[in-house]
Amino acid sequence: MENIKEIIFELSKGCVDILPEGELEKKVLLAKKENRPLRVKLGIDASGPYIHLGFTIPLRKLKKFQEFGHTAVLIFGDFTGKIGDPTGKNKTRPQLTDEDIKENLKNYKTQVFKILDPKKTEIRLNGEWSDKLTPQDIIKLSSKMTVARMLERDYFENRYKHKIPISLHEFLYPLFQAYDSVAVRADIELGGTDQKFNLLLGREIQQEYGQEGQIIMTTPLLEGIDGTRKMSKSYDNYVGITEKPSEIFGKLMSIPDSLIIKYMLLTTDIPQKDIDSYKDEMENGKNPKEYKMILAKKIVSMYYSENESLRCEKEFNRIFKEKGLPDFIPSIKVSSEDSSIKITQFLKKYNLTESTSQASRLIQGKGVKINDNLVENFDFVYTPKKGDVIQVGKKRFVKID
RNA sequence: GGAGAGAUUCCCGAGCGGUCAAAGGGGGCAGACUGUAAAUCUGCUGGCUGAUGUCUUCGUAGGUUCGAAUCCUACUCUCUCCA
């Protein structure tokens, strides 16, 4: 892998933008000449403790850099998290406490190191330097940006057009993020395509502070399992890498066919030539489901094990092909006073539905089964027996213990 | 600082004194069809109860009225224009 062209190819593969063009090669050569690793920055949001498949795209790119000897610099946004973002219309987003941050950080580490090499990773909290900025510093920083440029960004433009409030401090966030690049002396910053502006701003600000500007590399955004919006915790369309294997498998099986190839390309190491032939085969009429299976198995084995992935496959077939039961059905203990109870009460009491009304709606919609027998009437009085299996909707199973 | 517009159920958005738990759409859930895909069709989408009713809900707090999401007052927040 000494060939510089090959290295550049590997590093840039799959990226949407590399700006400025051609600089990546210079940086890599420079690093070699100076005999130092490049510092490759990636920011992570401190507010949610989950890493999902979408975020693994830049993470895996970062990993690639590590393989070539470079240093991953993960910026954990505790500073911005602590300020809290009051943008939400009705609710002020909760400000994270030091406790939360500690907890989230801990969770992140275990997840991130499922992908990254800890020895070549530097995790930094941006509060470390942001907390120390004085008002003068902040004003100086803000003077590097104009309102017009801020408003040009889709995100603000839309809100401005639709008369949705924009708080002043929201303009500051990208600047702080940019300043992080100064603080850690980033050579390169990675991020999703939605981060392009912020990343470029980092480059500019570095130059204002007399550093060489970072190169920015953007990775594609991944649609969530709903197939439309980008994968995000807040849309509840994500696949978390620490979720239960069956859960990961199931979620992946429900992505639209049109995304199978994209998921393979962006989130797995399946070789390009295999992906190409899968694509051909699907276009020639093979059932896309088979390939979705390959994808789901692959991802489960990446984050768990191959055995686990085979188990998930079997389970999946059993449940959905043969309409059988899952491997693990959570059991519940029924208190003795419920030896005879209205089904709606029962469902609510044991958290299978949120309310009795919801329970009766579900029953009317033919969504509740006991031992595979449809519950026809919400007046039904249920006598729980050990071993009974209750199914609510498609996915919720519970066994009486 | 001044003038105006507005805040509706998860979201958008109608309603503008009773027939409003509140149109329509989106999203979500469930059912049919399937490959737990997409598309399509159907139902549901405040709580408690039953199959009738009852309680809470239309920014917040009061008021007018037999009766208010709808009128009045104050407050909070947002937007627009002016300075």
Image (spheres, coloured by chain):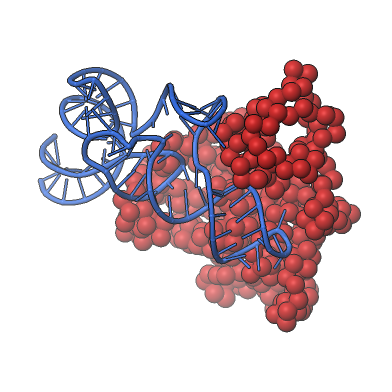
B49 above or below A9?
A: above
* Residue in the foreground of this view, choosing between A94 and A296: A296
* Residue A123 showing in the rendered view: no
Provide residue A398's location: percent of width, then percent of height. 77, 37
Q: Is residue A296 above or below residue A344?
A: below
Provide residue A76's location: percent of width, then percent of height: 60, 45
Q: Position of residue A220 (x, y in %)?
A: 59, 65
Residue A305 image offset from top left, x and y in percent: 85, 53
In front: A70, or A235? A235
Write down the colour of chain B. blue
Q: In the shown orientation, is residue A88 left or right of residue A161?
A: right
Q: Please tell me whether residue A175 is drawn above or below residue A84 in the rendered image.
A: below
Which image quarter holds the N terminus of chain A? Answer: bottom right
In this rendering, position of residue A78 left or right of residue A373: left
- Could you tell me which residue is drawn at 63 percent across and 73 percent down? A25
Asked where in the image residue A35 lies, by quadrant, the reply is bottom right
**Residue A363 in sight here:** yes
Which residue is at 73% across, 70% downward? A288
Drawn side of residue B79 relative to residue A327, left or right: left
What is the quadrant of the C terminus of chain A in the image? top right
Q: Residue placed at 74% from the left, 67% from the top?
A: A289
Tell me the red chain.
A
Q: Nearer the viewer, residue A362 or A255?
A: A362
The residue lying at 78 percent from left, 28 percent from top is A384
Q: Quick check: A168 left or right of A186?
A: left
Number of numbered discs present? 0
